[in-house]
Image: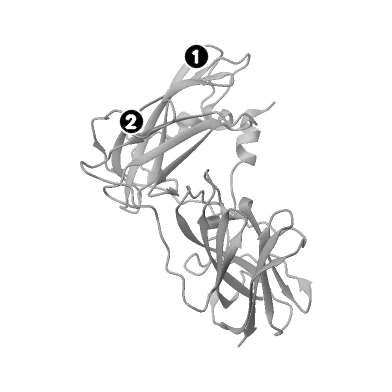
């Protein structure tokens, strides 16, 4: 297999926009049974390029309560999660750089980027990747370098912090595997820092209900223009994970918008202040909450009916918005 080609396929794309408004007609249903077609997928946005400032910190042992080992074997690969350093990303935002050792025990050359998947969490939410300028602080190419059988390399991954004090945990698993095996470690980035699971403010007029193991709120509808200037809407949701493992909105539930009884297609929006397409893919740990948005191209000025339900039938909630 051409691993470099595979790495390119794993890269995301991005989106472009302008904003206005729509209102709820008060129609909402907090729970009903249905099995509609699956929702259209959102396209991830790409990150810009960099500048960084290191602040190495001595690595403590994994925090009490860790349930994952910090070193071991994942399929054909050995992994040891080592240490971290605090830094600044290209915008000046606080970031963390985590280093782990990747050992290739497979029969062919492999790079960590196409062998493993890493997710970092803080306050129960998956952290965004950070872009660091100084390669002596974080070498982004370390994950892309192929390692021959039996060889090892230190890999560095950088993430934007959402708190200056809360602990950061990282989980590493195989990129393509059904085993669910993971390694992990928690880093105390500030003395006395504690995890406070992320919460959201849901307005009183939102339609809220349980969809399987998740609580979903249909919060608002905003009329916008897509990147071509066509009419579109952005629907805002609240998502709380009540399951026993990390989950994201995109793979936990399905959301559909209808107009004139026909399902709307996804819209590409450019203004990330209005619609951040990657939020639906942000992993949320049990007990944490996140705000996400979905964008749809409208076909008329008729009301928009939004439905969120389980992936395969079961309960769903609905809300209807009138375009202004």
Above or below, 93 relative to 54: below
Across and down, in percent, residue 255 comes to 66, 63
C-alpha gap between disc 2 and disc 1: 26 Å
Residue drawn at 34 percent across, 54 percent down? 91
Residue drawn at 70 percent across, 54 percent down? 311
- Asked whether, in this view, residue 120 is left or right of residue 317, the answer is left
Q: Do the residues labelled 2 and 1 touch (CB within 8 Å)?
A: no
Above or below, 13 relative to 171: below
Could you say which disc has been placed on residue 62 in the image? Answer: 2
Which quarter of the figure has residue 191? Answer: top left
Classed neighbour count for the residue bearing mark 2: other residues with Cα under 10 Å, few (<14), some (14–19), many (≥20): some
Q: Residue furthest top?
A: 150
* Quarter of the figure that contains the C terminus: bottom right
Residue drawn at 75 percent across, 64 percent down? 34
Across and down, in percent, residue 216 comes to 56, 63
Q: Residue furthest left?
A: 191
Q: Nearer the viewer, residue 106 or 226?
A: 106
In this orientation, does residue 41 appear? yes
- Asked whether, in this view, residue 288 is left or right of residue 12, the answer is left
In this orientation, does residue 131 appear? no
Q: Nearer the viewer, residue 68 or 85?
A: 68
Which quarter of the figure has residue 101? Answer: top left
Across and down, in percent, residue 186 comes to 36, 35
Could you say which disc has been placed on residue 151 in the image? Answer: 1
For mark 1, give the secondary structure: loop
Classed neighbour count for the residue bearing mark 1: other residues with Cα under 10 Å, few (<14), some (14–19), many (≥20): few
Count of all numbered marks drawn on residues in the image: 2
Which mark sits nearer the N-terminus, 2 or 1? 2
Above or below, 98 relative to 22: above
Q: Nearer the viewer, residue 137 or 127?
A: 127
Between tags 2 and 1, which lies in front? Answer: 2
């Amino acid at each position: 297999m051409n691993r470099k080609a595979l790495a390119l396929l794993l890269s995301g794309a991005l989106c472009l926009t302008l904003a206005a408004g729509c209102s709820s007609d008060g129609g909402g249903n907090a729970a009903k049974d249905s099995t509609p077609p699956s929702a259209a997928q959102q396209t991830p946005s790409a990150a810009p390029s960099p500048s960084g400032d290191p602040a190495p910190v001595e690595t403590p042992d994994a925090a009490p309560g860790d349930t994952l080992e910090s070193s071991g074997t994942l399929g054909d690969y050995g992994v040891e999660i080592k240490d971290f350093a605090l830094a600044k990303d290209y915008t000046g935002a606080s970031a963390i750089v985590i280093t782990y050792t990747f050992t290739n025990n497979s029969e062919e050359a492999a790079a960590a980027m196409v062998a493993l998947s890493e997710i970092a969490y803080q306050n129960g939410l998956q952290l965004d990747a950070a872009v660091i300028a100084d390669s002596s602080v974080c070498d982004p190419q370390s994950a892309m370098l192929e390692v021959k059988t039996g060889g090892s390399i230190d890999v560095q991954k950088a993430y934007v912090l959402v708190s200056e004090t809360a602990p950061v945990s990282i989980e590493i698993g195989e990129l393509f595997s059904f085993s669910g095996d993971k390694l992990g470690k928690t880093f105390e980035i500030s003395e006395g820092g504690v995890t406070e699971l992320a919460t959201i403010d849901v307005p009183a007029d939102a339609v809220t209900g349980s969809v399987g193991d998740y609580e979903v709120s249909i919060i608002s509808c905003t009329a916008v223009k897509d990147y071509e200037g066509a009419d579109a809407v952005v629907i805002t949701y609240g998502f709380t994970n009540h399951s026993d493992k990390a989950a994201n909105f995109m793979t936990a539930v399905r959301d559909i918008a209808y107009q004139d009884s026909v399902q709307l297609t996804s819209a590409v929006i450019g203004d990330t202040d209005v619609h951040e397409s990657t939020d639906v893919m942000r992993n949320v740990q049990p007990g944490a909450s996140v705000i996400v948005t979905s964008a749809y191209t409208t076909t008329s000025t008729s009301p928009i009916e939004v439905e969120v339900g389980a992936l395969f039938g079961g309960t769903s909630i609905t809300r209807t918005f009138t375009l202004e």
